[in-house]
Image (tube, rainbow, N blue to C red):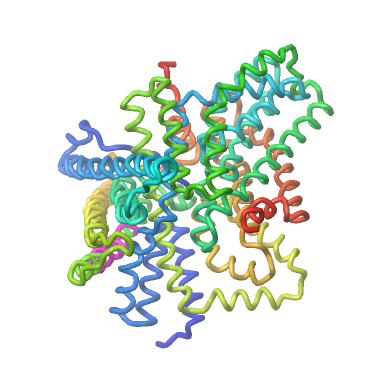
Amino acid sequence: MEFSNETLGILGFVSLLVLVVIGVRIYIAAAIVGLVGLIAMIGWDAGAGIVGTIPHSKSASYTLSVLPMFILIGYLAFHAGITDAVFDAARKWFGWLPGGLAVASVFATAGFAAVSGASTATAAVFSRVAIPEMLKSGYHPKLAAGVVAAGGTLATLIPPSAILVIYAIIVEESVGQLLLAGFIPGIVSALVYAGIIITWSIIDPTIGRPIRGYTWGERVKSVPGTFPVIAVIVIIFSAVYYGWATPTEAGALGAFVVFVLALAKGMKWDNLKDALLETAKLTVMIFTLIWGVLIFVRFLGFTGVPAEFTEWITSLDYPPVVIMIFILLGYAVLGMFMDAIGMMLLTLPVVYPAVIALGYDPIWFGIVVVKMAEVCLVTPPIGLNCFVVNAVRPDIPLTQVFRGVGPFVVADFITVGLFLAFPWIITWLPQQVLG
Amino acid sequence: MAHALGNRPTRQSAREGFIGWLDYFVWQIERAFTLLSSLFIFGLMMIGVIQVFGRKLFDAPIFGYIDMVELAMTTFAFLAISYTERLGGHVRMELLVGKLKGRVQWAAEFASVIVALFVVAILIYYGWTHTVRAYEFGDSTIDAEYPMWPSKLVVPIAFSLLWIRLLVMAYGYARLFADPARTPIGVPVVENVAEQAKAEAAEALGADAREGGR
């Protein structure tokens, strides 16, 4: 039986989908479909030979070495006593606003995001630091829970973010530019969250009242505690912006600063070992996914399906922005059932060339896709962040957590709308480095 | 969905018959591999710091730094792959598999592992020939001309351990398929979203809680 290349490509895509849905690990599903597909197209020796070299050749690339560094910063950050200090400072500076403690939680999670790239971990930690304070001050549990679950999602936009590095690798864009591009959208997201809280608290003042009475002296004194966060931001931002170090070197320096602080806070050998083992585990998971999917991508490239898809998309008789909105809605739906990294890796090889052909900026699209994937961390049915908050605070029922994040999901759609209307929010900063 | 913590082999589970012993035996090697991979990550941090300070302060960058990093990368890109497989840490969609029960569940898991055994076997063979070629042709890195083959050798070694792990898992699933009343041993346990959230929270807070003995 002879198949045309396009048919093989589509068959491959369908098989991959079936394997993923029935629960085969994504790296295995992608590798087997890529392997069988390549063998069918170019024969056993050539096909299997190509596949055999991909794991090594795609992994041993200096650009990817930034991943373990960023992950390590996140795991060490838990031992450096950063969370309490950051929340304390945020409370003293922003507590006077309507819904002040919730606003403070948003800025504290944003600050912590600068040393962590993990949404769920951020949500877990702040469930313990911020929620008790809010409840003590009479804040409604749904606001307290919602803000922490939503605040956790800021971690993936604000560098160091592993997922932005992965996007850069897959679409072959500059890692540095994507990292820079994440800063402003991360801050915009946090500001929109804050805006929503303030509006909500003005409409319904019982939900969370302002916390006043801190002196300027107290405020100033709370700043030094945030030093690790500021140090990591300055190191990574300036290294990428001025180019005095590669992202890997900046990551190494950031990890070292947090490591020294954690030692000063009395981190034990066991803690360090745990942090390193967890880093090794997450690192290998990401690398495995990357080479697995790249085996599939190699096959897909042979079939010409991405080019066909691009041709089809660009021939559609709709304005690009309409197509973009549909693509983003597609991601919102997909994200409800799939992990963000897996979703991006599986779809980008086909979707990305089409988006570029529509005239969208590669960096812009990366930030928007990651933002959409994050929205799905707080929406049913998976909404992992909400489950995490509920796991730490079983006294706040899951339904209340989901109800609490509702306004923040609205905020996220406003944010994505802003990105669509004013793309320069994302592209301005990375372009400064280019120019 | 993402990375479930899974149940870990322990000294206690090692006493649960042959499968328990086998599971724990392979686990010891996996832990050693993962510790080695962790050490390389720690080394990557240290060498990065030395490189930046060396270059900026003393104008003395480490010779062949990028080459060295690229060669070392196979350690943290591959060595922990089997350890992570055992913990059920590789990404997959559990929406359907998580709903299956009893024999159907174990049959599905078993089939999945068989597919993996096939792919990984091919990756071992061609990863090995890739290494042999590098050795015979004397492939070296561009800048510092370090030999490439030791780095490439890590790949088939890590995959071989993964293959053995998959074999143990196949045995574990077959045993459960034969008698679904048995306790799962030697296989990662699927967690639902709530259990997974609990595990993730424990992972973050467990580490946090130990800080300063709070």
Q: Is residue A432 above or below residue A220?
A: below
Q: Residue at x 54, y 58 (%)?
A: A174
Q: Is residue A275 above or below residue A373?
A: above
Expressed as whole percent of the image width and height from the top left, the position of residue B133 reads 21, 71
Judge whether residue A328 can be spotted in this image. yes
Expressed as whole percent of the image width and height from the top left, the position of residue B167 reads 23, 54
Q: Is residue B117 above or below residue A8?
A: above
**Residue A408 lies in the magenta stretch:** no
Q: Residue at x 33, y 46 (%)?
A: B84
In the picture, measured across the screen, residue A179 lies left or right of residue B57, that is right
Name the residue nearer the viewer: B124 or A135: B124
Instruction: Identify the image quadrant of residue A60.
Output: bottom left
Residue extending farthest bottom: A2
Q: Residue at x 32, y 68 (%)?
A: A53
Q: Residue at x 20, y 32 (%)?
A: B11
Name the residue nearer the viewer: A264 or B200: A264
Count of marks overlaid on the render: 0
In the picture, measured across the screen, residue A182 lies left or right of residue A249, that is right
Q: Quadrant of the N terminus of chain A?
A: bottom left
- Boundaries of the magenta span: B112-126
In the picture, measured across the screen, residue B200 lies left or right of residue A420, that is left
**Residue B115 lies in the magenta stretch:** yes
Overall secondary structure of the magenta stretch? helix
Expressed as whole percent of the image width and height from the top left, the position of residue B201 reads 48, 31
Name the residue nearer the viewer: A99 or A171: A171
